[in-house]
Image: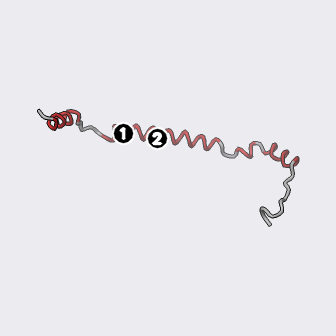
Amino acid sequence: MNLATTLALAAAETEHHGNVMAETFIFGVIAFILFLALGFVVLSYRNVANRHSHKAEAYAAKNPVQQQAGHGKH
């Protein structure tokens, strides 16, 4: 036997005809769960500024905004 024959026989032995979609379905499930988890993290930061509006109002009362000449809105 030569190298080419050995490689051809080894490739034939390892070849299988299964359902590729069933074998790779788990990758889609993992990605879906990951995106759901990341979406939950993003959703948890929704409306955070309004949860502490009393602190923001107290800070704004103590520190009034000063206009800078030459920058910003005219």
Circle number at residue 37: none
Which of the 4 image quadrants contains residue 5?
A: top left
The spot of residue 58 in percent (x, y) is 85, 45
The quarter of the rendered structure image containing the N terminus is top left
Alpha carbons under labels 2 and 1: distance apart: 12 Å
The spot of residue 47 in percent (x, y) is 69, 46
Q: Residue furthest left?
A: 1
Disc 1 is placed on an element classified as: helix
Q: Is residue 36 left or right of residue 68?
A: left
Dot 1, crowdedness within 10 Å: few (<14), some or many (≥20)? few
Q: Say above or below: 47 vs 73.
A: above
The spot of residue 64 in percent (x, y) is 87, 52
Mark earlier in primary sequence (2, 1) = 1
Nearer the observer, 17 or 65: 65
Dot 2, crowdedness within 10 Å: few (<14), some or many (≥20)? few
Badge count: 2
Q: Residue furthest bottom?
A: 74
Q: Residue at x 85, y 56 (%)?
A: 66
Q: Residue at x 83, y 59 (%)?
A: 68
Mark 2–mark 1 CB contact (< 8 Å): no
Which of the 4 image quadrants contains residue 2?
A: top left
Q: Which residue is mark 2?
A: 31
Q: Is residue 22 left or right of residue 59?
A: left
The spot of residue 35 in percent (x, y) is 51, 42
Q: Say above or below: 59 vs 69.
A: above
Q: Which residue is mark 1?
A: 24
> Which three-letter amino acid code belongs to the residue tagged 1?
Thr
Nearer the observer, 2 or 34: 2
The quarter of the rendered structure image containing the C terminus is bottom right
> Which three-letter amino acid code belongs to the residue tagged 2?
Ala
Q: Is residue 54 left or right of residue 11?
A: right
Q: Residue at x 56, y 43 (%)?
A: 39
